[in-house]
């Protein structure tokens, strides 16, 4: 298995729903996002995934949530705007964007989004064979 990864950052606001103390008050995070893609085979050039395509796609997706109050996104209408659910949202949006650009997601064996909420805390979402 070959893995290729990139990272980027975005800033967003959210508030947790329920009894979570100060976390129920709107607050901001600067999130660091890692995207790791695994493939079974490299292409004729020896690459697993085009890093430039990954970088452009992640940048485009994150620009759509940068500065946003996550609770207002339709995706979070019935979900907690947690780091875990945010990772799922970002990964689903990445693959939708890639598919629209002509990339074949069937070439990917596994993909993971890991979001760091702080220097010591993260959550991730892994999707196999989208």
Image (tube, rainbow, N blue to C red):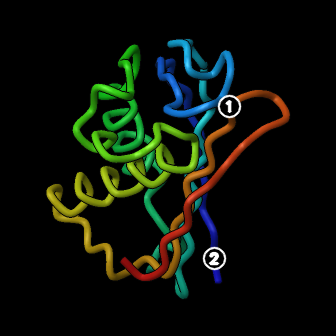
Q: Nearer the viewer, mark 1 or mark 2?
A: 1
Q: Nearer the viewer, residue 1 or 111?
A: 111
Quarter of the rendering containing residue 102 = bottom left
In-image side of 2 versus 77 (left or right) = right
Q: Residues within 10 Å of mark 1 (few under 14, many from 20)?
A: some
Which secondary structure, mark 1?
Answer: loop
At horizontal 39% and vertical 32% (from top left) the residue drawn is 62
Give me the residue at 55% from left, 53% from top.
113
Q: Nearer the viewer, residue 7 or 27?
A: 27
- Based on the displayed image, in which of its 4 quarters is residue 36 positioned? bottom right
Location of mark 1 (residue): 117
Question: Badge 2: few (under 14), some or many (20 or more) residues near its Cα, within 10 Å?
Answer: few
Tell me which label, 1 or 2, sits earlier in the chain.
2
Secondary structure at numbered mark 2: strand
Q: What percent of the width, then of the height, locates residue 85?
A: 48, 49
Which image quadrant: the C terminus? Answer: bottom left
Picture layout, residue 10 above or below residue 36:
above
**Up-down: is 107 above or below 12?**
below
Above/below status of 50 relative to 109? above
Q: Residue 106 appears in which quarter of the rendering?
A: bottom left
> Residue 34 at what x, y percent from top left?
61, 46
| Residue 47 spot, x, y in % from top left | 52, 69
Percent x, y of residue 39: 53, 79
Q: Residue at x 48, y 22 (%)?
A: 14
Mark pair 1, 2: CA separation: 27 Å
* Residue on which disc 2 sits: 2
Question: What is the residue that sits farthest to the right in this orientation?
Answer: 120
User: Which numbered dot is residue 30?
Assistant: none
Q: What residue is rendered at 39% in x and 46% in y?
A: 79
């Amino acid at each position: 298995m070959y893995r290729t990864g990139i990272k980027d950052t975005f800033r967003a606001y959210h508030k947790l729903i329920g009894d979570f103390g100060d976390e129920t008050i709107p607050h901001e995070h600067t999130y660091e996002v890692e995207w790791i893609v695994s493939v079974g085979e490299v292409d004729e050039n020896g690459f697993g995934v085009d890093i430039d395509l990954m970088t452009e796609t992640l940048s485009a997706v994150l620009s759509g949530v940068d500065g946003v109050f996550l609770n207002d996104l339709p995706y979070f209408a019935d979900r907690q705007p947690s780091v875990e659910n945010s990772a799922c949202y970002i990964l689903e949006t990445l693959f939708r964007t890639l598919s629209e650009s002509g990339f074949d997601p069937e070439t990917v064996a596994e993909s993971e989004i890991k979001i760091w909420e702080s220097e010591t805390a993260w959550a991730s979402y892994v999707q196999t064979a989208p």
